[in-house]
């Protein structure tokens, strides 16, 4: 959705002809040729904006066009850059949905620093898209490591009879990185054919010595 051309003129502080304000054709001092800024042309307003057709034209310098061109001339940026700014964003890259908090944890994990996404998007859209692809890939790798770690904690919890404690630890991490982990870990645990990487975790846990607690009498309060 493009902004209203008269609104754009207002935003950029163009000098309006007060008598034209509520008309279909609103006139302004032309910011491109400044011809009507000359003292002798005090009453002239050469730039005309058509609020119905959303176009502009200067009757003196003949500069003309639509909203995109208007903004591009006023701000000294290319029309393509303006177009990108207002492009109806039908397709949202999944990485653009990552919350600030998720990105923060990811950056902590990979030791990176977040770029200025808005600036990058404006400067080079293709580069921005490639960077999003990379971010998305890094996030998925990060999440996979987190899931594997959660699984590791789950197995330790089960083998050490401290299930509750480790489950709470996993839930804590879930809240931090705003992503489900426990469900995944339980799913893997109950799988008959577990992925290869689980073997390392289990081998490690098996190598640890856990002392089984004394059986608790019925009706007694369990610790942990
Ligand atoms: Zn002009």
Image (cartoon, rainbow, N blue to C red):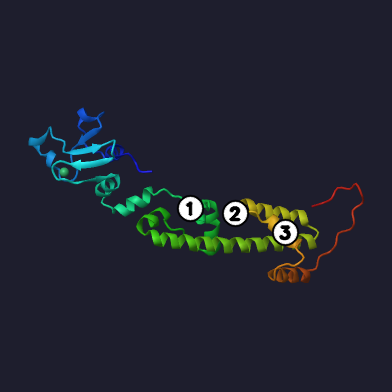
Is residue 144 visible in this depiction of the protein? yes
Q: Secondary structure at mark 3?
A: helix
Looking at the rendered structure, the secondary structure element under dot 1 is: loop
Marks 3 and 2: CB-CB under 8 Å?
no
Reading the image, the residue beneath label 3 is 187
Would you name the residue on which mark 1 appears? Answer: 92
Outermost residue on the right side: it is 217
Question: Where does residue 74 sit, x and y in percent of width and height?
Answer: 25, 46
Q: Nearer the viewer, residue 22 or 199?
A: 22
Left or right, 215 with reference to 9 = right
Q: Residue at x 25, y 51 (%)?
A: 76
* Location of mark 2 (residue): 177
Answer with mark 3 or mark 2, whichever residue precedes in sequence.
2
Q: Is residue 55 above or below residue 100?
A: above
Quarter assignment of residue 189: bottom right
Which SS class for mark 2?
A: helix
- In contact (CB < 8 Å): disc 1 and disc 2: no
Residue 22 x %, y %: 26, 28
Q: Which numbered circle lies on residue 36? A: none
Quick check: which quadrant has ligand 1? top left
Who is closer to the viewer here, 186 or 129?
129
Q: In the image shown, does 216 or 192 lie closer to the viewer? A: 192
């Amino acid at each position: 959705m493009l902004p209203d051309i008269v609104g754009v003129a207002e935003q950029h502080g163009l000098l309006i002809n007060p008598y034209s304000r509520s008309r279909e054709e609103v006139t302004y001092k032309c910011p491109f040729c400044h011809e009507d800024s000359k003292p002798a042309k005090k009453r002239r307003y050469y730039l005309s904006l058509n609020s119905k057709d959303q176009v502009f034209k200067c009757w003196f310098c003949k500069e003309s066009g639509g909203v995109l061109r208007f903004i591009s001339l006023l701000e000294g940026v290319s029309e393509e850059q303006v177009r990108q700014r207002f492009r109806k964003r039908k397709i949202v890259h999944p990485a653009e949905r990552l919350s600030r908090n998720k990105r923060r944890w990811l950056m902590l994990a990979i030791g990176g620093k977040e770029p200025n996404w808005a600036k990058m998007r404006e400067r080079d859209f293709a580069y921005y898209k490639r960077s999003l692809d990379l971010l998305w890939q890094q996030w998925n790798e990060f999440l996979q490591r987190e899931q594997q770690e959660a699984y590791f904690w789950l197995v330790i919890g089960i083998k050490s009879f401290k299930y509750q404690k480790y489950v709470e630890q996993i839930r804590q991490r879930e809240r931090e990185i705003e992503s489900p982990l426990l469900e995944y870990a339980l799913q893997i645990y109950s799988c008959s054919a577990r992925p290869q990487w689980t073997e390392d975790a289990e081998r490690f846990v098996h190598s640890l010595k856990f002392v089984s607690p004394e059986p608790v009498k019925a009706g007694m309060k369990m610790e942990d």
